[in-house]
């Protein structure tokens, strides 16, 4: 299954009763596995989690630790970029070259790298010698 199809399939199972904005994410791990996630909202609004965070959790639970590629989809008029927190979360496991495809359920796509999405990222290199 393609990353696109995996993200579109999981999108339908997002739990977003408060925003009514469902998001699906699929990550291909460096080992070839496909890991998916959806946003899961909560009546205590800040406790909700993003689709990307869910996909990262699934990847880690499956034993993969490196992101090769990301696909995010929502039923929005234009492709939805990951929120700031998710950019940092993705960067924890993906290098600056990792491609992130942002898509709409209508089929529009925009591709950026993690370097585009999070320039000047804080990473482990900044802590060397500390
Ligand atoms: N959301 C995601 O899951 N991923 C994104 O990239 C953008 C926003 C979710 C969070 C919340 O459940 C809903 O979309 C509206 O912000």
Image (cartoon, rainbow, N blue to C red):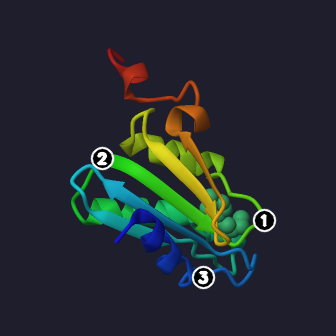
Q: Report which quarter residue 57 is drawn in.
A: bottom left
The structure residue drawn at horizontal position 26% and vertical position 62%, both measured from the top left corner, is 33
Residue 2 relative to residue 20: left or right:
left
**Reading the chain from its start, which is encountered first: label 2 or label 3?**
3
Q: Are marks 2 and 3 in contact (CB under 8 Å)?
A: no
Q: Which percent across, then down, holds residue 28?
A: 35, 57
Left or right for 29, reference 53: left
Residue under the image location 57 percent in, 71 percent down:
39
Q: Return the disc, 3 or 1, that comes first in the chain's sequence.
A: 3
Asked if one can make out residue 47 in the rendered structure from this viewpoint, the answer is yes
Q: Is residue 26 left or right of residue 58?
A: right
Circle nearer the N terminus (1, 2):
2
Q: Disc number at residue 15?
A: 3
Residue 106, image quadrant: bottom right
Marks 3 and 1, Cα distance to the nearest angstrom? 20 Å
Q: Are marks 3 and 1 in contact (CB under 8 Å)?
A: no
Q: CA distance from mark 2 to mark 3?
A: 26 Å
Position above or below: 68 against 7: above
Q: Position of residue 129 (x, y in %)?
A: 32, 14
Q: Nearer the viewer, residue 57 or 128?
A: 57
User: At x 57% / y 41%, what residue is drawn?
Assistant: 112
**Depth check: 109 or 95 in front?**
109
Q: Quadrant of ligand 1?
A: bottom right
| Quadrant (top left, top right, bottom left, bottom right) of the C terminus | top left
Badge 3: how crowded within 10 Å, few (<14), some, or many (20+)? many
Q: Secondary structure at mark 1?
A: loop
**SS label for mark 3:** loop
Identify the mark at residue 77; answer none if there is no mark: 1
115 left or right of 128? right
Query: Which mark, residue 66?
Result: 2
């Amino acid at each position: 299954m393609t990353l696109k199809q995996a993200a579109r399939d999981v999108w339908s199972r997002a739990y977003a009763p408060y925003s009514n904005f469902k998001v699906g994410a699929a990550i291909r791990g460096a080992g070839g596995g496909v890991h998916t996630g959806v946003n899961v909202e909560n009546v205590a609004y800040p406790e909700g989690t993003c689709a990307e965070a869910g996909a990262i959790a699934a990847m880690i639970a499956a034993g993969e630790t490196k992101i090769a590629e990301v696909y995010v989809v929502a039923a929005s008029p234009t492709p939805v970029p990951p929120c700031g927190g998710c950019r940092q979360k993705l960067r924890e496991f993906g290098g600056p070259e990792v491609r992130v495809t942002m898509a709409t359920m209508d089929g529009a796509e925009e591709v950026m790298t993690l370097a585009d999405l999070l320039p000047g990222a804080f990473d482990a290199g900044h802590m060397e010698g500390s």
